[in-house]
Amino acid sequence: MPELPEVEITRRSIEPRIAGRTITCVTVRDPRLRWPVPARLPRLLAGRTVQRVARRAKYLLLECDGGTLILHLGMSGSLRILERQQDPGRHDHLDIAFGSRLLRLRDPRRFGSVLWHTGGPAQHRLLRGLGVEPLEEAFCGDLVYRLTRGRQTAIKPFLMNQAIVVGVGNIYASESLFGARIDPRTRAGTLARTRCERLAAAVKGTLNRALAAGGSTLRDFAAADGRQGYFQLETFVYGRAGEPCRVCGGAVREIRQGQRSTCFCPGCQR
DNA sequence: CACCACTCCTGCCCGC
DNA sequence: TGCGGGCAGGAGTGGT
């Protein structure tokens, strides 16, 4: 379940190993991802040079001469660098070769996507409508305050709406709301300014801590799948229904919001 | 618009 | 030990 920190850590780990290198061969073993991987992908990519690896929301952008390969890891996707050919596992659907070095995509649940796009990546239909990056300066209490005005929806699904703020998935949404001491059921539009400040700070803090935790394993990331950094992070509420809150000791509760589980501490979050 | 439910898929966990 | 069933979740899509 890569969220923004896992995707960013993946980006940092692969960029230095593929930027400036030329794609020699592309192997699609199973094209059945979120959308079918185009059959002409190998022909489209061969001979192109990766200039840089960027990220927008949870999308990785392999910016090449003449176009961008847009990757999304979905629920279970991971990328790894191999220095030499290795037998692919059952879910290793795609290899991009740079000489003997390989970038290999594994995705058991196949919710990920691989798309080729010519022209500016920002103009792609999947990227056009995305909201603000939570780790950028523009994302602040004042912006959260303005974005929430008039919104009737609960703050938890609001936070997870990628058209508003990107990169905050189910786990970090719950964790951030705990950090801000806000009840996930609160209607977004009713949050006072100070609570918006707390929320913006909590989102940044949660994501940055996850980044730091993942960053610490970056050295071995050659072999990594995004989980490594991810499961190192001790959660305050997510996945802890019925267990004692780490702050007040009260029982953590689990509810459903928009077909998603939400965990929170009724004692700490108001 | 704003909001909501549905959908894709496989690994994992539970109960029998 | 095996098997069926339920659940998890990102985010696009389509309905109200």
Image: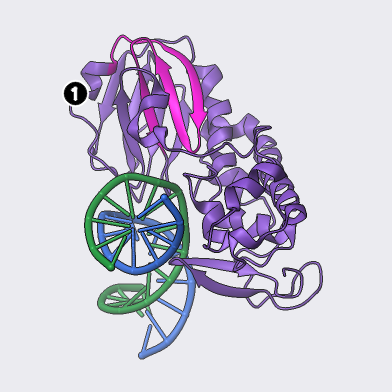
Chain colours: A purple, B blue, C green
Task: Tally the marks.
Answer: 1
Decide whether residue A67 is among the magenta residues.
yes
Q: Is residue B5 above or below residue A10?
A: below
In magenta, the rendered stretch is A45-72
> Which element type, helix, strand or loop, lies under badge 1?
loop
Q: Is residue A171 above or below residue A100?
A: below
| Pick the front one: A18 or A191 | A191
Q: Is residue C1 left or right of residue A258?
A: left
Examine the image and state in which quarter residue A255 appears.
Answer: bottom right
- Disc 1 sits on a residue from what chain? A
Q: Label 1: which residue?
A: A40
Helix, strand or loop for the magenta stretch, by majority: strand
- How far across and down, in percent of the image, does residue A230 sit? 60, 48
Disc 1 residue type? Answer: Arg
Decide whether residue A104 is among the magenta residues.
no
Residue A88 is at least partly visible in this image: no
Which residue is at 58% across, 56% downward?
A171
Q: Is residue A77 above or below residue A13?
A: below
Q: Is residue A161 above or below residue A255?
A: above
Which residue is at 69% across, 47% downward?
A200
Q: What crowding class fits label 1: few (fewer than 14 Cα within 10 Å), some (14-19), or many (20 or more)?
A: few
- How far across and down, in percent of the image, does residue A45 sit? 29, 17
Which residue lies most toward the front here? A150
- How far across and down, in percent of the image, does residue A199 sit? 70, 52
- How far across and down, in percent of the image, does residue A182 sit? 70, 63
The quarter of the rendered structure image containing the C terminus of chain A is: bottom right
Residue A179 is at least partly visible in this image: yes
